[in-house]
Amino acid sequence: MDLRPLKRLVSLVAVLLLLVPSALAVYSIQGTFDTSRLVTLSGGISQVEWSNPITYLRATLKDSDGNSVPWVIRLSPASVLVSQGFVRDSFTKGRNIVVEVWPTKAGDDGRPIVDPAKGERLGAAWKLTFDDGRVLQEASKSYAPWLEPAIFPSQR
């Protein structure tokens, strides 16, 4: 009996099992971000990195103390944003926004730093309000069922 096909199958399964955690890590909100607290920031958009599986928004945002800090905000995939009526041009440079983010778990102030040269902080968007009043709601109970009920006071 030739065992080569079985050995190939076992090897393939082993490789796939090694890759699954890496693939899931891309989508891990709960693992990377502190979903027990929201930070509200306001400021102007610097750049959007429109892509799948994750879109990133770069912005200089003011914290509650009025300090301007560069942030990288994780958004949904471009395909999801389009399905909600948002296109790349919705995120034009200089456009003012108010964003509620879950900061990364490390550090009290939303660190670790994404880019040491720029001092950017990383957060995942919960809700983004544009200067024209349009709202991009990034999460809901069905999207993030692990969240504490306090995060969902009447769905904000």
Image (cartoon, rainbow, N blue to C red):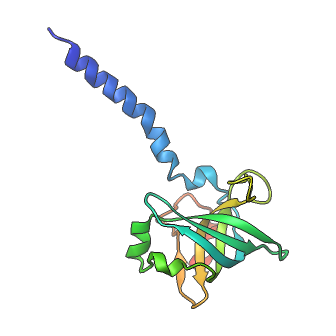
Report how many numbered discs are placed on residues in the image.
Answer: 0
Q: Is residue 49 left or right of residue 117?
A: left
Residue 130 placement: quadrant: bottom right
**In terms of image quadrants, where is residue 2?**
top left
Q: Is residue 156 visible?
A: no
Residue lying at the far bottom in this picture: please name it: 132
Q: Quadrant of the C terminus?
A: bottom right
Q: Is residue 105 left or right of residue 65?
A: left
Observer able to see residue 63: yes
| Res 127 quadrant in image | bottom right
Name which residue lies at 59% across and 70% down: 47
Give the residue at x 54% y 52%. Answer: 28
121 to the left or right of 137: right
Residue 115, percent across and down?
A: 69, 54
How far across and down, in percent of the image, does residue 68 sit?
A: 79, 72
Query: 48 or 135, which lies in front?
Result: 48
Q: Residue furthest top?
A: 1
Q: Tell me residue 61's x, y (percent).
A: 72, 73
Q: Of all residues shown, which one is farthest toward the right?
A: 65
Q: Position of residue 42 (x, y in %)?
A: 71, 78
Say which of 61 and 146 sits in front. 61
Vertical relation: 113 (above or below) 95: above
Q: Residue at x 60, y 82 (%)?
A: 129
Q: Residue furthest left?
A: 1
Asked if residue 23 lies left or right of residue 118, the reply is left
